[in-house]
Image (spheres, rainbow, N blue to C red):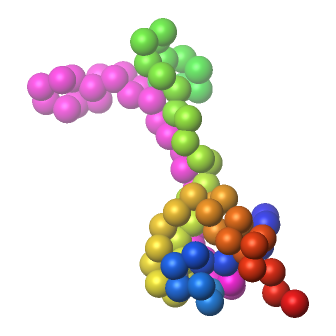
Amino acid sequence: MPAYLCPSCKTNRSRFNIIEQHPKAVKMDPRSGDVVQEYGPGEQDAFHAAYQGPALRVQCGACGLVEDEKTFAAFAEHNQLN
Ligand SMILES: [Zn+2]
């Protein structure tokens, strides 16, 4: 994992909640919202776009900001500890 620095409170480099995203493709009944089918990886039909978002989100353990991992990593990269 890269070093993180929170871009909101700008002080927290050590306390984070790592949010692992495990998207599940589903087909829902349009009226009831009931899930009528769940798809495994790559199984969804041709009109169903696969998840494109990040695998990880990160929450700052100090101020609560939730952002993509790369946002925290980029801020640390530009504000390195001496
Ligand atoms: Zn923060």
At 80% from the left and 81% from the top, the residue drawn is 80
Q: In the rendering, at what x and y percent does residue 10 appear?
A: 59, 85
In the image as oriented, which residue stretches furthest toward the top? 46
At 68% from the left and 84% from the top, the residue drawn is 13
At 62% from the left and 89% from the top, the residue drawn is 11
| Residue 53 in the figure: left or right of residue 79 | left
Residue interval drawn in magenta: 13-38
| Residue 70 in the figure: left or right of residue 22 | right
For the N terminus, the image quarter is: bottom right
Is 28 magenta? The answer is yes
Query: Picture quarter containing residue 82?
Result: bottom right
Q: Which of 39 and 54 is in front in this view?
A: 54
Q: In the rendering, at what x and y percent does residue 19 appear?
A: 55, 61
Above or below: residue 76 compared with residue 30: below
User: Is residue 19 at all visible to an observer of this figure?
Assistant: no
Q: In the rendering, at what x and y percent does residue 2 appear?
A: 79, 66
Query: Picture quarter containing residue 58?
Result: bottom right
| Residue 48 in the figure: left or right of residue 75 | left
At 55% from the left and 42% from the top, the residue drawn is 53
Q: Nearer the viewer, residue 71 or 22?
A: 71
How many circles with numbers are drawn on the protein? 0
In the image as oriented, which residue stretches furthest toward the right? 82
Query: Picture quarter containing residue 69?
Result: bottom right
Q: Nearer the viewer, residue 35 or 48?
A: 48
Above or below: residue 16 compared with residue 54: below
User: Is residue 34 at all visible to an observer of this figure?
Assistant: yes
Is 32 magenta? The answer is yes
Above or below: residue 21 compared with residue 3: above
Q: In the rendering, at what x and y percent does residue 26 appear?
A: 39, 28
In the image as oriented, which residue stretches furthest toward the left? 31
